[in-house]
Image (cartoon, rainbow, N blue to C red):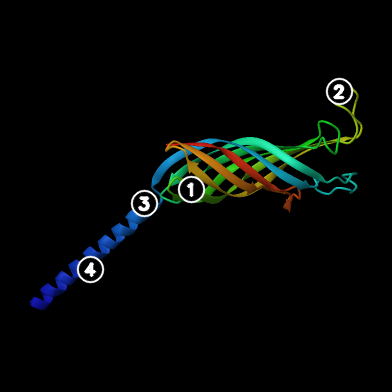
């Protein structure tokens, strides 16, 4: 009788311990995915790009060979949802333009616009937050190369090329945020946009540095 009672008690204890363990695991998982706020805002950026705007310059389809380089500038914004203590998911989009007036005729440029879904991991230390992540999305690039001509007249430009292409965007980034207040954060970030078109990586690449404000709630 005592053995049967002891066996039942042990069975009940094992069941209770298993239930508590399962409950603790579910509670921990829900903590990781727990909604922890929202932030969004705008950022300005500048960077340095170098490489060839054309995919295969100097060939039969593209009868010129030109290497571009210079400062690219632009604007954009991002919005993120925070989950738990370390993970954020959101979306962002930017436009970045590299003027080529130094080497080519006035009005020449390479402009890229892209956007997509981002995810990053962040670590908070007092007023500072450090983050690293990646954005995956799509974009479009416009190339206007004017080798001879002028924007001040209405004459047809014979030696000019315009090309537009779409690309798959992979944009790794890292940065830091400083909480000016609980609502307003100052953001610094650097990235390197990788443009993949027809399974080839564009060789017009370089780093960009961002600064802006995020509004949190």
Q: CA distance from mark 1 to mark 2?
A: 49 Å
**Label 3 SS:** helix
Residue that protrudes farthest toward the left in the picture:
1
Say which residue appears at 83% left-offset and 31% top-offset: 106
Where is residue 203 shown, x and y percent of the image?
76, 50
User: Could you tell which of marks 3 and 1 lies nearer the N-terminus?
Assistant: 3
Image-quadrant location for residue 76 = top right
Nearer to me, 35 or 5:
35
Residue carrying label 2: 152
Q: Quadrant of the C terminus?
A: top left
Residue carrying label 1: 129
User: Could you tell which of marks 2 and 3 lies nearer the N-terminus?
Assistant: 3
Tag on residue 14?
Answer: 4
Q: CA distance from mark 2 to mark 4?
A: 86 Å
164 to 25, vertically: above or below: above
- The mark closer to the camera, 2 or 4, is 2
Residue carrying label 3: 30
Say which residue appears at 81% left-offset and 44% top-offset: 68
Q: CA distance from mark 4 to mark 3?
A: 24 Å
Tag on residue 140?
Answer: none
Q: Would you call the spot at circle 1 few (<14 residues within 10 Å), some (14-19), or many (20 or more)?
A: some
């Amino acid at each position: 009788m005592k053995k049967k009672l002891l066996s039942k008690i042990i069975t009940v204890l094992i069941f209770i311990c298993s239930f508590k363990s399962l409950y603790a695991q579910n509670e921990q998982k829900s903590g990781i995915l727990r909604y922890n706020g929202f932030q969004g805002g705008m950022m300005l950026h500048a960077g340095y790009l170098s490489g060839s705007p054309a995919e295969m310059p100097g060939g039969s389809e593209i009868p010129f060979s030109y290497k571009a380089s210079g400062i690219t500038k632009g604007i954009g914004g991002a919005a993120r949802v925070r989950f738990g203590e370390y993970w954020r998911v959101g979306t962002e989009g930017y436009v970045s333009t590299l003027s080529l007036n130094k080497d080519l005729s006035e009005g020449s440029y390479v402009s890229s616009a892209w956007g997509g879904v981002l995810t990053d991991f962040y670590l908070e230390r007092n007023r500072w937050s450090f983050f690293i992540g990646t954005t995956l999305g799509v974009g479009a690039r416009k190339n206007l190369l004017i080798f001879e001509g002028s924007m001040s007249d209405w004459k047809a430009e014979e030696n000019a090329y315009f090309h537009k292409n779409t690309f798959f965007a992979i944009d790794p980034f890292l940065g830091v945020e400083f909480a000016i207040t609980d609502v307003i954060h100052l953001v610094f970030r650097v990235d390197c946009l990788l443009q993949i078109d027809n399974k080839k990586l564009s060789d017009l690449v370089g780093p960009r540095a961002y600064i802006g404000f995020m509004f949190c709630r």
